[in-house]
Image (spheres, rainbow, N blue to C red):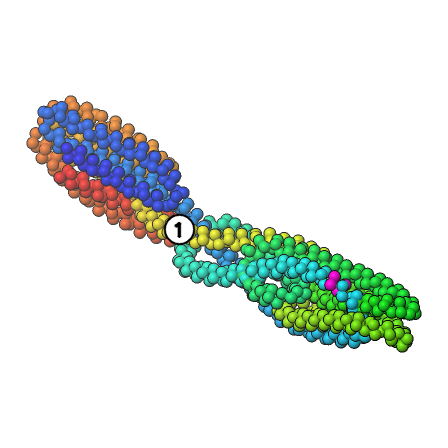
Amino acid sequence: MLSSKSKSGLLETSTNRNTLATPRGSKTGRSGAAKVDTETSPQQSSRLSVDRSPRSSDSKPVAERRSSKISTAPDKQPRIVKGSEVQVQLASVQEELKKVKERLTFEETEKARLLGELSDTKKAMEEVSDKLGEALLAQKKAEERSELDKFRADELEQSAIEAAQRREEEWSKELEDARNQREADADALLTATHELEKVRLELAMTTDAKNAALSHADDAVKIAEVNAHKVEILSGEINRLKSLFDSNLEKKANETEELIKKLDSEAENLKLELEKAKGAQKSLVEMEALVKELKIELTETKKAESDAVDLVNEWKMKVELLESQLEEGNLSEKALLDSLDSLTKKLEENKSALDDAQSEVGSLRGKVEALELEIDRHEVELEESNHQLDLTKKEVLEAEKSVQVLNLEIRRLEEEKAQALNNEMLAASNVESLTKENNKLAMELKTTREDSEKAKKAMEGLTSALHEVSTETRDLQERFLVKQEEVEISNAEVEKLRIALKNTQEKYEVMLDEAKYEIACLKKAVGKCETELESSRSEWFEKELQLTAAIKNLEDDIISVKSEMDKTLEMNKQIKEETKAAEEEAKTLHDKLRKTESELIAASKSVEEAKEEITCLKTRLLDNENELQSITQENDDLRIHETAASKKIKELTELLAEFSIIKNENIVDIRGNASHRDDGELSISEKEYDILPKTVQVVEDKVTKPKAGSSESLSEESQEVFAEDMKPKDHVLENTSYEIPTKTEQLVCEGRETMESADDELLLKIENNYLDQTNGENGENGNTSPTKQQQQQQLQKQKKALLRKFGSMLKKKKGNTK
């Protein structure tokens, strides 16, 4: 019964060890779970083989129950059990060796994989940090350039504003001279009042259209400013992420330096991974070039947007509500660098707004042409008035009847004169607005130095149109002078007639007083209009001062425009051609904006991907570090077990051989002292000890070939040997029906004591031999490569573990036998 308990205890310890060994494989990672499952299948089969062998030994108590006559059978069972237990131990040791080897191979592959992942993550982090640094430097340079351009543009705008003021003063002087000349012709203002009202209605329509266009332009400017504010926010976030990234990199660099020192020996295996990393670096260099190109295109788009804002602001100069809108525009310009994400979405809206503004410019030009047609119409009406003056001369010659007609014609002439004055005022204002528009168009259309020649041609075209308008106004002034002379002549003739027609004059004095009153009212209205014009001019001056902040990048272009406008009037003829070139440039800018939108979207996606990669790399680094620590610990343990097991197997084979020799000697002594009756029983003991050399030979043959993958065949052959050797024992035990005398029992006890002492001596020898072998191997390992040294250390560790297990098992056997 003691033997059966010892067998069950050994089986439980072996199974517990197997179960404890399996969780280590689960720690290696998720990828190794499938491998561990496949590896456990041969282990289970080996366990079944081990479990079968003790059952044959468990059948011994059944034989003992049948043979009630034999009283010494329980004393002989320990001998039989020792051989079976040794075989079970050998099978368990072989299974553990298999497990250890499989785990070592699996962990080495995982270790190589983790090292490759660590190197890739480090390289990716370094590349991302380099990219961020370059982006920040480019952004700083762009900001410095923009500040310099702003300062230059402010100075140029101030000089342009002063020149415009001087020109307006000259125009005002000319207008005052014209007014002084036209005061004599106040009688002709009555006819001009009706036409003034019509012109006012048309101006109101044009102002409404301009207000709508300006509202669209303001929306576009606000959108651009909001986008700029978002760009600034993104730059701050990039700086913050860079600082966090640098701090994380420093921490991880300190942590990984220790790992790198340990893993220098495995650099040869990582050359292939370095080549892959080089390919990734090339792709990253290409991405950096793309990012630089995108930045250049962003600066170009910003310049184009500033040009578009200038165009829109020029139209704002013509509206009374420009101050409030410009103030909002200045506030929104500060927020222009806020975000790139919203900028890409709203660039299309800006494009549509620019298209609308261009269409409105075309409509305004059409209105200017309509005004020119109206001026022509007024000229025709003036010719008609001349014809009417001729008729008045004829009627003045006709005595009393023609006086009334002359008075009516004089009133008509006064109205026509007033209308002509108003038309001249309108023409002067149009000329001023056109000159301002020419200056602003020149400033906007010459944003790039390469297109300066085209801009000059366009400015010359516009100046030619303005020159034509000015010539037409001069012609009108000359015609008015001619008419004034004719009116003076008619007045002289009227004065001559008054002598003859005093009686008629008295009748019509009341009518003349009423006409004078109406003329005075008309003069007051004209004065109010003049005051309104002056107030509008003052407002324009204030708005121009506010627009100085908006005009930034046009210093050189403004200087060239001023010099060309001062030198010759021929340069002004090129304005028409510049407008065409400007439209073409606007189209090109639209195309560029679309390209930049797509590229900005790609850049934002790449930034997001880089952030996600950084987070993934951080998590991978942490996981890899944990896995490396666990793997190193497991490798150390497994190497210890492997080396110990391999050495213990060899020592146990020698132990078993010596053990069998000692027992054979003890058996011979027992035979000499025992009687003839004990021959059958001693033959049983001989058969028991004949099993040991067979098992030793089998174990030695299989241990010498562990790497050839013959672990399963070893367990099967040992099982067959055990089965064949145990069959005759069971047969003998069943057939024996005699008792052993007391002398034989005493000899058996003496033999057991001698065997136990021999076992102790063998254990001491095994330990001494093991220490000598380890020292010798350590000396030899100094000359070998690091990979071989690691493998030898693993084998030594495994052997040590197996030796310890066999020592503990032998001690348990001694306790059970006692």
Q: Quadrant of the C terminus?
A: top left
SS of the residue under disc 1: helix
Location of residue 546 (image quadrant): bottom right
Q: Which residues are magenta?
A: 195-199
Q: Nearer the viewer, residue 255 or 164?
A: 164
Main secondary-structure element of the magenta-colored stretch:
helix
Residue occupying the point 89% across, 69% down? 400
Q: Is residue 303 above or below residue 497?
A: above
Left or right placement of residue 441 versus residue 666 in this view: right
Image side of residue 148 versus residue 64, left or right: right
Residue 725 in view (yes/no): yes
x then y, percent, for residue 462: 77, 63
Q: Which residue is at 31% across, 51% downward? A: 775
Q: Which residue is mark 1?
A: 623
Left or right: 103, with 538 as reference point: left
Residue 338 image position (x, y, % from top left)? 54, 61
